[in-house]
Amino acid sequence: MTEKKEFGQFFTSKKIAEFMTKWVLLGNPKQVLDPAVGEGIFLKLIHQLSPATQLQACEIDPKMVQRFRNNNSYQVKLYEGDYLFTKVQHKPDAIICNPPYLRFQKIDRRKEILQNLKNMTGFSFSGYTNAAAMFLVKCLYELKSGGRSAFIIPYEFLNAGYGKCVKEYLLKEKALAKIILFDSKVNVFEDALTTSCILLMEKGCCDIVEFCNLHSVEDLTDVSLLNKKRSYQYTDLDCNAKWLNYFTGHQESGRHLIPMKDYVDVKRGIATGCNSYFTLSRAQVDELQLTEQVLHPCIVKAPDITTGILTKHELERMENSNKKMFLFDGKQATTKEELQYLKKGEESGVPQAYLTSHRHPWYSLEKTPAAPILFSVFSRNHMKIIRNETQARHLTSFHGIYLREPNDTKENANLLYCYLITPLAQRILHQSHREYANGLDKFEPGDLQNAQILDLSLIEDKDRKEIEQIYLEMRRRQIERAKIKGEMEYLEKLEEIFQKYLE
């Protein structure tokens, strides 16, 4: 598993490999390249089906190179090293690939790679581009005109900001023919929590893309038999948009939607660098004899909040149940006990952690203020949104939503919260999410900033008063810990109010 993490290796199933192989062989290629060959499943199939085809491969992992040589006897030109820095001798007329699944932080010489890609293509790709997308771009550049390619790749780039240039390049080269999307609940790779799609390409030959949905690997059949597909002309595709919406053809729209950034700022939570040291429970605080001057109330984990409205009563409940909900601020330390705790951190190696080693002093924390609305970074089926009435700060499990002036009032925060929890708002917001495996959704701050919301300035005073009353009733019931039997009734009332402003 260590090698897999280092090189981002996750191996292709035979069913998927057979499907991808058939696609590239439909073009009758003379020269096929696999730039991340691994154990060689693709080339083995190509050799079996088309023995005369010349084969090239690249592999960065020395141990995998040895395994490949030991397990395969057919002739192949094998380059040992990183494909992103490898110049192949013969320009292939077919490329088939399961590229490494490495996030941008793990890529060595990232800036150099991006500059090389810019020199090749003329496109300035984002620094957040992952290794799989880098492989895709370089392969497409090196593929002969008219050549075919099949990639299995995380579909994160379809919705991520860094994917904009990648999508533009695919369209510019008139290469993208089909995107086959696996449901996020399907683990295509047993040992990887990642989303997956198959890209089928034919360089210079396409002006229509088919978006195909699959719920199982077993649904992979002959390319021509794929169903549940939607076709779009290249000219109808917006590279700034979230391309996952093209698979359903469903775009929530309304005359009165605005980007959330017109109304709020979205900021990620505080990254401490060592939660086990910087976050404390009441029992730990008492044992260490720390004073209130070095403590900030804080939401450490999303599951710690069990109500939609965070009040002082809920904070007291968390404190009494001994949840970690205090953030240690070492810059305010003055007492003997507080200074001893700083020394304990030094002795246990906290200053050598990545984030703390880049801070001066190591125990200084980000000055992120309490946010009136908290938005859970990860979710399944339903987005967790919290109205924060307290001064509790939040760590990275939540993003903070801050209303801009002149909208920064308690009443407007209540109004925005009531809108965001409705099924209507969540359907619209869902268009801006990123999907991970097992049905896990993620929002980055930029995703939320650009997400569409109702222009709340349009809400009339009469409706504002009714919304406020509904909010106060939900709040009262939560404080009393009463079961909200009529919770759906509240949401239906709120949705009915907001819906009429979108019609």
Image (cartoon, rainbow, N blue to C red):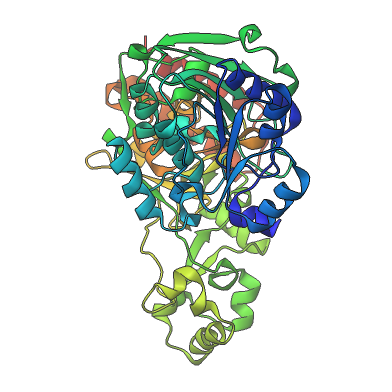
Quarter of the rendering occupied by the C terminus: top left
- Where residue 188 appears, as percent x and y from the top left, is 69, 33
- Where residue 266 appears, as percent x and y from the top left, is 36, 44
Q: Nearer the viewer, residue 322 or 353?
A: 353
- Where residue 441 appears, as percent x and y from the top left, is 56, 36
Quarter of the rendering containing residue 141:
top left
Label count reads 0
With respect to residue 499, does 452 lie above or below? below
Does the image show residue 156?
yes
Quarter of the rendering occupied by the N terminus: bottom right
Q: Nearer the viewer, residue 496 or 470?
A: 496
**Residue at 44 percent of width and 45 percent of height:** 87
**Residue at 44 percent of width and 18 percent of height:** 146
Does the image show residue 376?
no
**Residue at 35 percent of width and 12 percent of height:** 236
**Residue at 48 percent of width and 32 percent of height:** 433
- Where residue 461 appears, as percent x and y from the top left, is 30, 23
Quarter of the rendering containing residue 229:
top right
- Is 430 on the left or on the right of 303, as rendered? left
With respect to residue 206, does 181 lie above or below? below
Farthest left residue? 406
